[in-house]
Image: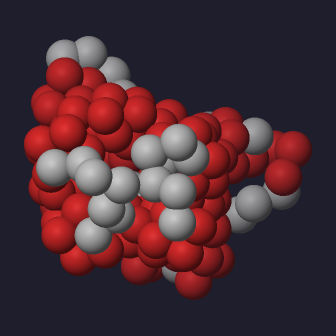
Amino acid sequence: MKDDKLYNIIFPVWLFLFFPPVILITLAGNFIIDSLVVIAGYFLFKPGEGLSCLEFYKKSIPKVWIFGFLADLIGAFLLFACVTLQDVTGLPDAVIQGISYDPFSNVLALILILVAMTISALCILFFNHRFTFNKLIKDELIRWQIAIFIAILTLPWTFLLPTKLFV
């Protein structure tokens, strides 16, 4: 009898967030967090351009929210690829278990998750700098500052949550 991999039965927390009906909660949570960060960014970096906080918020939140979720999906896809392509990548079972259930149980798993989070952050940074704030904020330095601020605070921190806490 060969050893069965029981850890393939339970979805990792970071993957579960993208499935119905949990995705609705994820989207709502992301919207609330993104809203708070955009408003804080307005007051911290004072983008000016004659926009009130409400105008700035209304013009930026849809893109910040959508691009942020897209960036989270990109990071989750990278982790999903590591797990599903284990035979191709040659990653040991301990690393796959770490990615799926407890990032802190394996150093390589933690590094791979941090890489996925960094890629998500860079996507958030790029999308917001290039598309969300390109015409909204003329000052290049402020545009970079607010894009970095949003990228750091809206990272997919849930990738670090151990699934074992929820099962």
The answer to whether 166 appears left or right of 47 in the picture is: left
Q: State the residue in front, 85 or 4.
A: 85
| Residue 80: image location, x then y, percent | 59, 41
| Above or below 143: residue 44 | below
Q: Quadrant of the N terminus?
A: top right
The answer to whether 132 appears left or right of 42 in the picture is: right
Q: Tell how many labels.
A: 0
Picture quadrant of residue 74: top right
| Above or below 130: residue 31 | above
Residue for point 87% across, 44% down = 88
Q: State the residue in front, 165 or 29.
A: 29
Residue for point 52% across, 66% down = 139
Q: State the residue in front, 50 or 144.
A: 50
On the question of residue 154 being in view, the answer is no
| Residue 126: image location, x then y, percent | 62, 53
| Above or below 23: residue 147 | below
Residue for point 27% across, 52% down = 50
Residue for point 19% across, 22% down = 24
| Residue 106: image location, x then y, percent | 53, 78
The answer to whether 35 appears left or right of 100 in the picture is: left
Q: Which residue is most to the front?
A: 50
| Residue 12: image location, x then y, percent | 38, 45
On the question of residue 31 being in view, the answer is yes
